[in-house]
Image (cartoon, grey):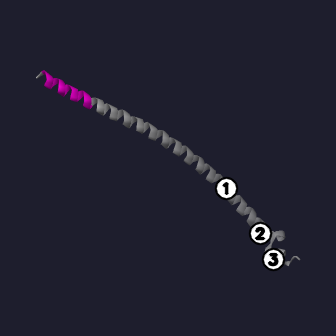
């Protein structure tokens, strides 16, 4: 009977150790995933900021192109008429 109780106790301790190890691995993975998510979010924010700045710069260049295309010196008909 004493051996039977010890084997049940050992099985219970083994199961607890196995579950504890699984919990530690899960928590470690969760922390790592959370850090990766934060890094991706920071990179995404940087890309959004850069894209916004590029959009503004492109819009300014478009305005400049439009302005130059309607000015007398930059009109396509006058450039074609020049020798």
User: Tag on residue 56?
Assistant: 1
Q: Is the magenta stretch mostly helix, strand or loop?
A: helix
Q: Which quarter of the picture shows residue 22? A: top left
In-image side of 51 versus 72 (left or right): left
**If the image is split into quadrants, where does the C terminus sit?**
bottom right
**Whole-percent x and y of residue 13?**
25, 27
Q: Earlier in the sequence, mark 2 or mark 1?
A: 1
Q: Looking at the picture, does residue 41 appear above or below residue 12?
A: below
**Whole-percent x and y of residue 8?**
18, 28
Q: How crowded is mark 3: few (under 14 residues within 10 Å), some or many (20 or more)?
A: few
Alpha-carbon span between mark 2 and mark 1: 20 Å
Q: Earlier in the sequence, mark 1 or mark 3?
A: 1
Q: Give the range drawn in magenta.
A: 2-15
Alpha-carbon span between mark 1 and mark 3: 30 Å
In-image side of 69 versus 4 (left or right): right
Q: How crowded is mark 1: few (under 14 residues within 10 Å), some or many (20 or more)?
A: few
Foreground pick, 52 / 7: 7
- Residue lying at 76% horizontally and 65% vertically, measured from the top left: 67
Q: Looking at the picture, does residue 2 appear above or below residue 52?
A: above
Q: Looking at the picture, does residue 39 appear above or below residue 75?
A: above
**If the image is split into quadrants, where does the N terminus sit?**
top left
Q: Which quarter of the picture shows residue 63? A: bottom right
- Residue lying at 22% horizontally and 26% vertically, measured from the top left: 10
- Residue lying at 71% horizontally and 63% vertically, measured from the top left: 62
Alpha-carbon span between mark 3 and mark 2: 10 Å
User: Tag on residue 47?
Assistant: none
Residue that label 3 marks: 77
**Whole-percent x and y of residue 66?**
74, 66
């Amino acid at each position: 009977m004493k051996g039977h109780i010890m084997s049940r106790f050992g099985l219970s301790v083994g199961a607890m150790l196995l579950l504890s190890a699984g919990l530690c691995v899960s928590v470690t993975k969760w922390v790592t995933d959370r850090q990766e998510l934060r890094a991706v979010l920071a990179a995404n924010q940087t890309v959004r900021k850069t894209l916004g700045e590029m959009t503004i710069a492109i819009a300014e260049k478009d305005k400049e192109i439009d302005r130059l295309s309607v000015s007398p010196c930059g009109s396509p008909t006058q450039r074609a008429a020049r020798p």
